[in-house]
Amino acid sequence: MNKRLNALYKLLVGDPTARFELLMLLGRVLVPRYRFKWPDLDWMDNGDFNDYLGHFGEGTGLNTDRRWMLGQLLRLTCEVPGDTAECGVYRGASSYAICRFNASLKSAPRNHFAFDSFQGLSAPLAEDGHHWSGGDLRVPLARLWPFQAVEAS
């Protein structure tokens, strides 16, 4: 048995593809519905992007691919005139990415508007499911990163 484990260990240490395939096999057993992503995605080794994630404590979070996709979608709007807005900003990570993108454009300046009650979610109804509760995603306005926040009167 030790020889088999040793051989398996040597295979896995030297072969990242074998390690990933073993991880997928274990994943199918432990969480059959989980969908893996290939580990060699562009965003995994992008220093600027990983720094951005670090500002929001999301370097090991579950939304990294969604944050990357936001940046890719923003690139499609380079030639589209007008301001930008986000409804439901939580801690402002997406709005921060949008503002950074807007600032990088050579076209007319864009304003960005972030709308949120900062009270969290309302109490869910039966048809909303059971994942969230009233008040989830509540963040004080002062924690909005790093914008100049203006409360509506």
Image: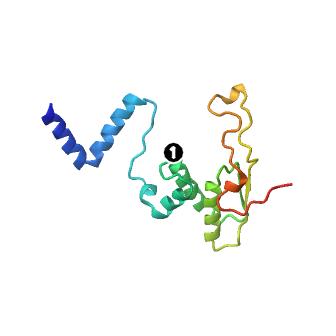
The structure residue drawn at horizontal position 73% and vertical position 65%, both measured from the top left corner, is: 111
**Type of amino acid at the residue the image marks with label 1:** Leu
Front residue of this view, candidates 153 and 27 = 153
The structure residue drawn at horizontal position 45% and vertical position 63%, both measured from the top left corner, is: 47
Q: Is residue 139 left or right of residue 54?
A: right
Which of the 4 quarters of the picture holds residue 122? top right
Q: 78 above or below 93?
A: below
Q: Quadrant of the N terminus?
A: top left
Q: Position of residue 52 (x, y in %)?
A: 54, 60
The structure residue drawn at horizontal position 67% and vertical position 55%, both measured from the top left corner, is: 143
Few, some or many C-alpha atoms within 10 Å of disc 1 (few <14, some 14-19, many ≥20)?
few
Residue 76 in sight here: no
Front residue of this view, candidates 66 and 53 = 53
Q: Position of residue 137 (x, y in %)?
A: 66, 43
Front residue of this view, candidates 13 and 65 = 13
Residue beneath label 1, please?
62
